[in-house]
Image: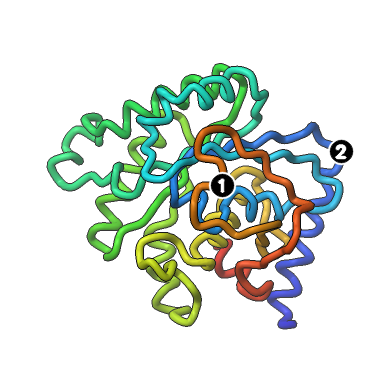
Amino acid sequence: MSRRLLAFFLAALTVSTAWADERVRRVLFIGNSLTYVNDLPNAFASLAPPGTHIQVDMIASGGATLGDATGNPSVSRALAEGGYTDVVLQERGGEAFCPSVCQQNAAASLPAMQSARDLSRRARASGAHVFYLGTWQSSKETNEALEFGERAIAKANDATYIEIAEPRRKLMLTRPEMAWTHADRQHPGYATTAMMALRTWRAVFHAMPAAAPCVAGEVHYHAPKPDGVLHIDTSATPRTCLVAEDEVPVLAGG
């Protein structure tokens, strides 16, 4: 193990010990197939150090937008009664895309803006912190238009923005051997899901993850529970790690 990598994991371990006696963190992911393919919430939950009290849930169905989530009774009940401390919103790919005309009004005309506003308001009313997890496009130019919309939506709704598009594109150039895209050429590959899990962990806990993200139980391609709340069981088997441990620092970002 390199000296740099060793220092990274020692720092992460030191920070993680501070969480052992904190209150239970209840994290809800609201999303779509970008969220459930390769089980992003499950991979996120696996990053919890020993002694960390965390429960992770997901509401996600294929092709769903956050607009769909606003009218979903399962979402309404979860936000009102679930006692979540943190809510992670992930819009359907491209819904936050904001080209030059859209940028003139700071993305205010995007339907995705209104959906995020409604969900963020309800999440905060129940005491949760809100995070807006980014998606990605295929080029630098389209990523920039997408990220403009995502940043504007996050800012307007007092949500913490988790950037994915441009960091992913740059890493694809330097780590082309990693599984960035699913075999279907549309959904995230293992590396992209790992990157989202690691960067979401950093945003939620303000600390570097100390382990590689792994999925407990079956790795899903189809929505595991499209009509309700999926409670992540981190004790399920088998256990599939999405990336090698030595890839964690670069995927988590600095």
> Is residue 62 visible to the viewer in this orientation of the structure?
yes
> Dot 1, how many residues are within 10 Å of its Cα: few (below 14), some (14-19), or many (20+)?
some
Q: Cα distance, mark 1 to mark 2?
A: 32 Å
Return the residue found at the far left.
101
Q: Quadrant of residue 110?
A: top left
**Above/below status of 245 relative to 25:** below
User: Which residue is label 1 attached to?
Assistant: 224
Q: Residue at x 50, y 39 (%)?
A: 226
Secondary element type, mark 2? loop
Q: Position of residue 191 (x, y in %)?
A: 52, 68
Q: Position of residue 58 (x, y in %)?
A: 58, 39
Q: Residue at x 67, y 39 (%)?
A: 231
**Above/below status of 203 relative to 156:** below
Q: Nearer the viewer, residue 45 or 61?
A: 61
Secondary element type, mark 1? loop
The amino acid at mark 1 is Pro
**Above/below status of 110 relative to 43:** above
Q: Residue at x 67, y 45 (%)?
A: 205
User: Which residue is label 2 attached to?
Assistant: 21
> Is residue 88 visible to the viewer in this orientation of the structure?
no
Q: Position of residue 42 (x, y in %)?
A: 64, 51
The amino acid at mark 2 is Asp
Quadrant where the C terminus sits is bottom right
Sequence-wise first label, 1 or 2:
2
Q: Residue at x 84, y 50 (%)?
A: 17
Quadrant where the N terminus sits is bottom right
